Image (tube, rainbow, N blue to C red):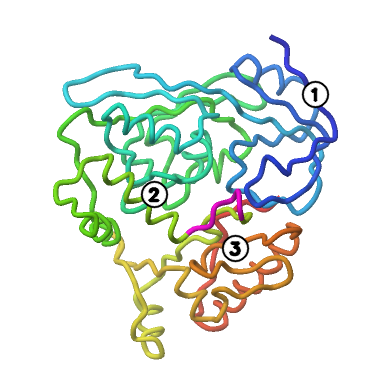
Amino acid sequence: MAITIQHTVSLLPYNTFGIDVKAAHFVSVQTEDDMRTALRSGISPVLVLGGGSNILFTRDVTGLIIKNDISHIRVVREFKNRAWVDTGAGVQWHALVTWAVENNLGGLENMSLIPGTVGAAPVQNIGAYGVELKDVFVSLKAMNTATGQIRSFSLKECAFGYRDSVFKRELKGKYIILSVRVSLTTHRHKLNLSYGDIGKTLSEAGINQPGIRDISEAVCQIRRSKLPDPAEIGNCGSFFKNPETDLTVLNNIRKTHPDVPSYPLPDGRVKIPAGWLIEQCGWKGKRVGNTGSYARQALVLVNYGGATGEEVKNLSDQIITSVQNTFGITLEREVNIM
């Protein structure tokens, strides 16, 4: 089936921040052949859009927006205690988690309710509550934007790091992810209860022997209590990465803030919650024009209605400067600015 390229299309329905900008050209693709045809349209530059949950538009977009709607979920290989599941890049991430839980496949439950699509998941190695995509990842298929050729990437080739991958660095803009393959447990699930909020939520519900469904439901409950629904208040979830720093920086902060939370890293450094840093600087719940820092979670910047992308970006600049001046730590945005 031939693709249809539309012109001067509002991107308001296609980004969770609720920013109303226009795309000069826009096309939805459902198959690999559609994707190849779109890339050969001759329109450039090309921007691939998934769920629009990790992008802040500050201006109208020239070139071609490709909405990746390749959608399938299927078991492609079964082992003694595992199954490989292949999923199209256009599937909503939480839809995959829900499907896995309903089919008693374990490994994704801690990442319930993360916004965005499956295709975006490997780009920043999504993770939550002690689990990251790399923990279940097998491989992915991606299309070279210049040649249209399809290549498979292994776990090692993706070079996953904390909210990082080769697709954010050397291969940024050079490949479009088509599908992702993960390895999930079929029984004797290895449950991850390392984050206290999960155990506390399960305990309060009287669940002493949780299964993967219980954990998924607990995570959903926790996330809904802390994070705003994009359908009600525009946002992209966590706007900044949790900074990783040296012990000397942490010890310096402890001189004035002895209660600073921190988490040890394998390389001897520590991770400090960005939300805590932002809150200490007085930004939590603060509104600036049509945007602000969310009252329940300082890490989340929101659009209260009518905000421009430039407004949100300016607020993030102010927060970065404030944290730098107060703690000597430079926050890094998790959200892509366009």
Verify CB contact (< 8 Å) between mark 3 and mark 1.
Answer: no
Task: Give the main secondary structure of the magenta stretch.
Answer: loop
Q: Residues under labels 2 and 3: Cα distance?
A: 20 Å
| Mark whose residue sits in front, 2 or 3 | 2
Q: Which mark is residue 42?
A: 1
Check the image and report above or below for 69 versus 314. above
Along the horizontal axis of the image, is 230 left or right of 40?
left
Q: Which amino acid does the dot numbered 2 rest on?
A: Cys
* 302 lies above or below 76: below
Vertical position of residue 213 compared to residue 313: above or below: above
Crowding near the residue tagged with mark 3, few <14, some 14–19, many ≥20 C-alpha atoms within 10 Å: many
- Circle 1 — which element? loop
Picture quarter containing residue 303?
A: bottom right
> Which residue, given by chain and number where applicable, does mark 3 sit on?
301
Report the front residue among 214 and 174: 214
Q: Secondary structure at mark 2?
A: helix
* Left or right position of 272 against 7: left
Residue 220's tag is 2
Q: Amino acid under label 3?
A: Leu
Q: Residue at x 48, y 75 (%)?
A: 277
In this view of the protein, which residue sits in the foreground, 310 or 298? 298
72 part of magenta stretch: no
